[in-house]
Amino acid sequence: MVHATITPIHTADLVAEGELMPVLAYLVEHPDARVLVDTGLLETHPAAADLDPRVRPLEEWGLDVASVDIVVNTHLHFDHCGGNRMFAGRPVYVQRAELDDARALGPEYTVPQWVDPPDAALDYVPVDGELELLPGVLLVPAPGHTRGSQIVVVETDAGRVVIAGDTAVWSGELDEPTTDGQRLILALDPAEVLLAHQHEPWRP
């Protein structure tokens, strides 16, 4: 059994339908590496103005940026890659289809300068399909929210945990799944699912 632990990192809040919605990244502490899943928001941008982002200062994240060895983006919408530029020189794993779409569709899809910052050369590692990132840590394609979305499956002492990105935004979407990605999550029989915009995990 791999003794991996997962800690939520509250990077910002968005306003959706008048309610604050957290923007969460997750730090996976594994015996072989520290992996940050998604990088949240560091700053605001006109592309996000309709969601009225409330960015939390980096010192409140509780994250030692220098200690992160690997970054994984579940997808490249602005609220999941806004901090990528902090991790120049470290591998950033993303599904190839997702990286291709983010670069091809540009501002219709994301904030291009957050995907490819002009002041920081990012070391993207395009992934084609499933990848065992570390023992007990698996990247799995989960299309639905975007064509190239992926989830991160982590085996922990408490059981299998899925970091879902936006494959499921709310717990209710896993109670009544409508996409292949959501059905895939359930088929993995997780002990819990960690969501990007909800503090409480989903549990069966």
Image (tube, rainbow, N blue to C red):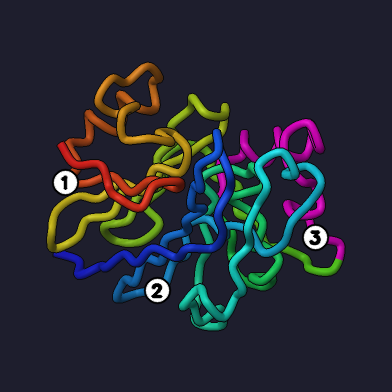
Q: Position of residue 8 (x, y in %)?
A: 38, 63
Image position of 3 (left or right of 176): left
Please tell me which residue is depicted at 48% across the width and 27% down the height of the picture: 143
Give the percent coordinates (x, y) of residue 30: 31, 71
Q: Of marks 3 and 1, which one's residue comes earlier in the chain? A: 3
Question: Which badge, 1 or 2, comes first in the chain's sequence?
Answer: 2
Q: CA distance from mark 2 to mark 3?
A: 25 Å
Identify the residue position indicated by label 1 in the image.
191
Q: Is residue 178 left or right of residue 78?
A: left
Q: Earlier in the sequence, mark 2 or mark 3?
A: 2
* Local secondary structure at mark 1: loop
- Majority SS type along the magenta span: helix
Residue found at the far right of this picture: 118
Q: Secondary structure at mark 3?
A: loop
On the image, which quarter does residue 186 sit in? top left
Secondary element type, mark 2:
strand
State the residue at coordinates (22%, 35%): 188
Residue that label 2 marks: 33
Density class for disc 3 (Cα within 10 Å; few <14, some 14-19, many ≥20) is some
Distance, label 1 to label 2, CA atoms, is 23 Å
Pinpoint residue 2: horizontal percent, then vertical percent.
20, 66
User: Magenta stretch?
Assistant: 94-118
In terms of depth relative to the viewer, which is nearer, 18 or 176?
18
Other residues around mark 1 within 10 Å, as few (<14) / some (14–19) / many (≥20) = some
Q: Which residue is mark 3?
A: 117
Image coordinates of residue 81 in percent, x first then y, are 63, 53
The kind of residue tagged 1 is Ala
- Is 136 situated above or below 61? above
Q: Amino acid type of disc 2?
A: Ala
